[in-house]
Image (cartoon, grey):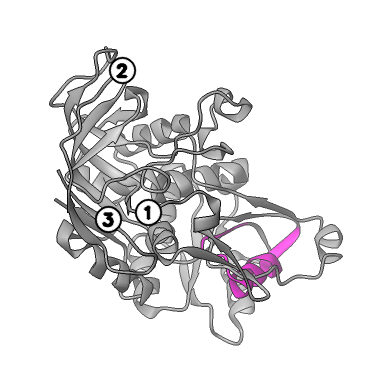
Amino acid sequence: MKSFQMFDFGGPLKESDLPDPKPSGHEVVVAVKAAGVCHSDLHIWEGSYDLGGGKRLRLADRGISLPLTLGHETAGEIMSVGPEVKDRKAGEMVLVYPWIGCGICRVCKMGFENLCMKPRCLGVHCDGGYSDQIVVPDSKYLIPLDGLDPVALAPYACSGVTTYSALKKLGPVIKDERVLIVGAGGLGLMALTILKAMGGKGAVVVDIDAKRRAAALDVGALAAIDGAASDALAQVQAALGGPGWAAVDLVGSPQTAGLAFDSLAKGGHMIMVGLFGGQAPWPLPFIPMKAAKIEGSYTGNLAETRELLDLVRSGAAPKIPIQTRPLEKATEALEDLKAGRIVGRVVLTP
């Protein structure tokens, strides 16, 4: 099989010809038809996260070994199954759930493998979808597409379920109050469409890029505000109809976190998703004084992914802008994502 692998953090991905995998046990081999390029891929490619104050979290120190095939947004066709697989067969089109844990710890048994302390995530700790084949360790991580387009569906394995899980954490308030969404990249546009599918009242979006703000309006944002404007907070609260009750920060920088927090009413709820990096910008006394709830959200679990695809099958979620590129352009796609040249999502097609 042909894979594009990372041999050096930050270096160009290199084509590798590897032996075709043969599944054993509960394993399934999937022929990749679509592999989304996610901002998390960019962090992994760069090799670290910015912790602020000159500190960095280096992935080489956290069990990420090279060479590695990136790609955790994967959809494709089942090629072959191991002898223990009874619920899937060759020829089925599936979405691959990548956030796999050890399977035996407490959080895994509770259904939250995405929060496992010993993860085996595809495209992060194990080889992923920047390839023409991918090995999935168990058929339970495959969700039938039932005729849906694999290119359109691949991003739901990360940007989709990540934003769905974050919005779910806000609870029923999304049906009654406008939500602030900070960031109109692939995650932000996906969040807008999913919020609509969930019956949400709507969202005000903040982004510093004019093209992404325009894209947000195209997929249904109630307002799109320049986060770099000197009166951004006043614009946000005006568009929300006053201090807000719900905010989702999909960027995760000191500036975006500060704006999201400052936009909240007393008792408001803020979900932190983005991993851009830095340190929290607000004074600690303001958290109890505002009685605000700040909650982190990391991807989503398998059950939520199944729920999300049910929503997509219902036709309630509008499509986000997607551009396809050949697998050979994987490094170029990462570079364009880093430079902010992408609106929506890039999906690689082997």
> Which label's residue is closer to the chain start, 2 or 3?
3
Q: Is residue 239 shown left or right of residue 194?
A: right
The residues tagged by marks 3 and 1 sit, at their Cα atoms, a distance apart of 9 Å
Q: How many C-alpha atoms fall within 10 Å of the one at disc 3: few (<14), some, or many (≥20)? A: many
Marks 2 & 3, CB-CB < 8 Å contact: no
Occupied quadrant, residue 14 = bottom left
Marks 1 & 2, CB-CB < 8 Å contact: no
The residues tagged by marks 1 and 2 sit, at their Cα atoms, a distance apart of 26 Å
Report the residue at 29% width, 24% height from top: 27
Task: Answer yes or no: is residue 269 visible.
Answer: yes
What segment is highlighted magenta in the picture? 247-266
> Which label's residue is closer to the chain start, 1 or 2?
2
Question: Could you say which is closer to the camera, residue 19 or residue 155?
Answer: 19
Helix, strand or loop under label 2: loop
Q: Is residue 91 shown left or right of residue 278?
A: left
Helix, strand or loop under label 3: strand
Occupied quadrant, residue 45 = bottom left
User: Label 3, on which residue?
Assistant: 5
Q: Is residue 198 shown left or right of residue 294?
A: left
Question: Could you say which is closer to the camera, residue 1 or residue 248?
Answer: 1
Task: Answer yes or no: is residue 317 visible.
Answer: no
Q: Quadrant of the N terminus?
A: top left
Q: Which mark is residue 25?
A: 2
Q: Which mark is residue 66?
A: 1
Where's residue 62, x and y in %? 54, 52
- Identified by mark 3, the residue type is Gln
- Identified by mark 2, the residue type is Gly
| 98 over 41 or under it: above or below | above
Where's residue 5, x and y in %? 27, 55
